[in-house]
Image (cartoon, rainbow, N blue to C red):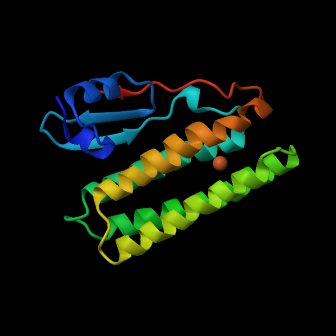
C-alpha cells in the first residue's frame, strides 16, 4: 500500500510501490511506531569506491544529508535547522567535490571534465535550493528529492561508480535498499 515514502518517489500504483520496495537501492525509510516518518540514507559497503578519502567523505555526506532531511522534517517546529543543515551540506559538498576532482586528476581519469561539469551542476541546483529555503519556499519533498535522487542515486551511485575501477572496484552493481 502506498505510503508517504511513495510521495517522494512518485509511485502511482500499488504495483509500482511493490517494485520500489523490491528494488535494489540505498535507502531505508523507517516508520516509527508512533507513525512518524523518517527517511534515512544508509551507508553500506557496496557504496565504497575503494578510495579511503572519497569513501570517508561520501559517508560524511550521507550523515549530513540525513541531518538535512531531519531539519526539513522539523522545519515547522524549528525553522533555523534546515538552513543551517543546508549550509553545512553545501560546504562539505564543495570541499568534497574539489577533493574528488583532485584525486581523479592525479589518476588522469578520462572523464574528469564531464565529471567536473556534473559536480558544478549539482552545486548550482544546491544553491538554487538554498535560495528557496532562505526565502521560505522550499518544501520537504524538494529537499529529499535533491539529496536522494540527484546527489545520491544519480551522482554518487551512478556517475561516481564509473571511476570505481580506478580503485579496483566494479562500476556495476547496486546497493540494497530496505523499507521497513
Ligand atoms: Fe563525483
- Identify the residue at the far top of this view: 22
State whether residue 25 appears in this view: yes
Residue 52: horizontal and vertical position, in percent?
70, 38
Residue 38: horizontal and vertical position, in percent?
27, 42
State whether residue 63 appears in this view: no
Residue at left 44%, top 64%? 86
- Identify the residue at the far left of this view: 34
Q: Quadrant of residue 34?
A: top left
Residue at left 36%, top 70%? 133
Point out the image quarter for the C terminus. Answer: top left
Residue 39: horizontal and vertical position, in percent?
32, 42
Question: Left or right of 108: which side holds 11?
Answer: left
Residue at left 71%, top 33%? 164
Q: Quadrant of residue 124?
A: bottom right
Question: Left or right of 38: which side holds 93?
Answer: right
Q: Quadrant of residue 23?
A: top left
Point out the image quarter for the N terminus. Answer: top left
Residue 168: horizontal and vertical position, in percent?
77, 26
On screen, 21 above or below 70? above
Residue at left 21%, top 35%? 31
On screen, 157 above or below 142? above
Between 4 and 98, the one nearer to me in the picture: 4
Question: Left or right of 133: which side holds 90?
Answer: right
Amino acid at each position: 500500500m502506498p505510503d508517504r515514502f511513495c510521495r517522494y518517489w512518485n509511485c502511482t500504483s500499488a504495483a509500482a510501490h511493490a517494485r520500489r520496495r523490491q528494488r535494489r537501492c540505498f535507502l531505508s525509510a523507517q516508520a516509527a511506531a508512533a507513525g512518524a516518518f523518517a527517511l534515512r540514507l544508509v551507508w553500506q559497503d557496496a557504496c565504497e569506491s575503494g578510495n579511503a578519502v572519497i569513501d570517508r567523505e561520501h559517508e560524511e555526506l550521507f550523515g549530513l544529508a540525513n541531518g538535512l532531511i531531519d531539519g526539513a522534517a522539523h522545519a515547522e517546529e524549528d525553522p533555523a535547522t534546515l538552513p543551517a543543515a543546508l549550509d553545512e551540506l553545501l560546504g562539505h559538498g564543495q570541499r568534497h567535490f574539489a577533493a574528488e576532482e583532485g584525486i581523479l586528476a592525479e589518476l588522469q581519469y578520462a572523464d574528469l571534465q564531464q565529471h567536473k561539469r556534473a559536480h558544478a551542476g549539482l552545486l548550482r541546483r544546491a544553491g538554487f535550493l538554498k535560495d528557496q529555503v532562505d526565502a521560505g519556499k522550499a518544501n520537504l519533498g524538494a529537499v529529499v528529492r535533491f539529496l536522494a535522487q540527484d546527489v545520491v542515486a544519480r551522482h554518487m551511485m551512478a556517475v561516481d561508480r564509473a571511476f570505481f575501477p580506478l580503485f579496483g572496484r566494479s562500476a556495476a552493481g547496486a546497493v540494497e535498499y530496505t523499507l521497513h
